[in-house]
Amino acid sequence: MAERAKRPTAIYTSIVLRRKGYKLGKTIGEGEFGKTKIASSTIHGTNVAIKIMDRKALPTQYTVKFLPRELAILLAVNHEHIVRVHEVIEGPGGMVYIVMELMATDLLARLGKVGGRLSEKQAKTYFIQIVSAVRHLHQNDIVHRDLKCENILLAAGNKAKVSDFGFSRYLSPELSKTFCGSLAYISPEVFLGAPYDPRKSDIWSLGVMLYIMVTGRKPYDDSVVARLDTAHRDPVTYQKNTVPGESCRAFIASILQYEVSDRPDIQQVAESTWLQPGGGGNVAAAQ
């Protein structure tokens, strides 16, 4: 047992996953709570992505509070625009392996390859799919709380899928109090540390994402934290060379409402004029 315990974690992980039918390849992503590797799968007959986490290396609050929520939600959701999780493997020594479908890239990386921004037509194609996924979550009393471009994964055929449910949770009668998400995307109420409706916070993040998709820049400068609340209160502005159409600008403005009561819910976003065929650019709804 002592000799077995001394095996390097990487080798031990490889052995555990090989017994499950997975052969690990290169690392394709690395974040605060783990790394993701590509793997071939004899079970699924295709390559998959495996997120590898070591409970011992993670903050206690994350392992006790957030990780159990993430695993439960990942196994519960089933939607064409949410990354599919094949299985969650609990390994010895506190290791956790989340086996997911393999995607080609993420939205942030895609923006970097096309000059920083998308055409309105392409942005609408992706945004319809993202909204569809978030509507599914909200209808099932699930909130994401970390929507951002790098958490939208892309596959061939212009297909977008929401991923990374590390801060997700089921709704409860009480408002959320956890400060979570990325500074550039968080809503004003989260930034101020006030109890918040996480559904409306998700909506704000969607508005930020759409702005970035069509302009290639953030709507609010998050480099000076002290000025962020003031920036949130002001209408968004556009640089001359990145001004989207009038209907798109109106749609973004309708989402990025400082007052929570003025912000639409996900159903209202999905039914907005800009997202409909002919609403500022003809794009067929995602199938």
Image: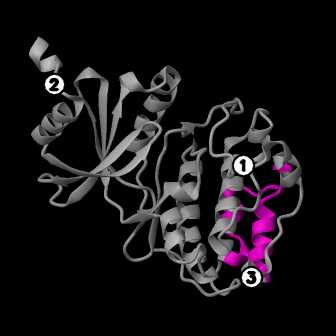
Instruction: Check disc 3: other Cα within 10 Å, few if <14, some if 14-19, many if 20+.
Output: few
What is the span of residues highlighted in magenta in the rendered image?
Answer: 246-274
Question: Looking at the picture, how far across and down is residue 157, in whole percent?
Answer: 39, 77
Disc nearer the start of the sequence (2/1): 2
Identify the residue under disc 3. 241
Image position of 84 with respect to 269: above or below: above
> Which disc number belongs to residue 7?
2
Work out whether residue 25 can be spotted.
Answer: yes
Image location (x, y in percent) of residue 23 = 15, 48
Mark in the foreground, 3 or 1: 3
The quadrant in which residue 142 appears is top right
Q: Amino acid at mark 1?
A: Lys
Query: So how many labels did they put on this image?
Result: 3
Q: Position of residue 161 (x, y in %)?
A: 46, 61
Q: Secondary structure at mark 3?
A: helix
Q: Are marks 3 and 1 in contact (CB under 8 Å)?
A: no
Marks 2/1: CA–CA distance: 47 Å
Label 2 vs 3, first from the N-terminus = 2
For residue 267: magenta? yes
Could you tell me which quadrant the N terminus lies in? top left
Q: Residue at x 52, y 22 (%)?
A: 61
**Is residue 1 among the parts visible in the rendering?**
no
Quarter of the image with the C terminus in it:
bottom left
Which callout, 3 or 1, points at the residue further toward the start of the chain?
A: 1
The residue tagged 1 is 200
Quarter-of-image position of residue 126: bottom right
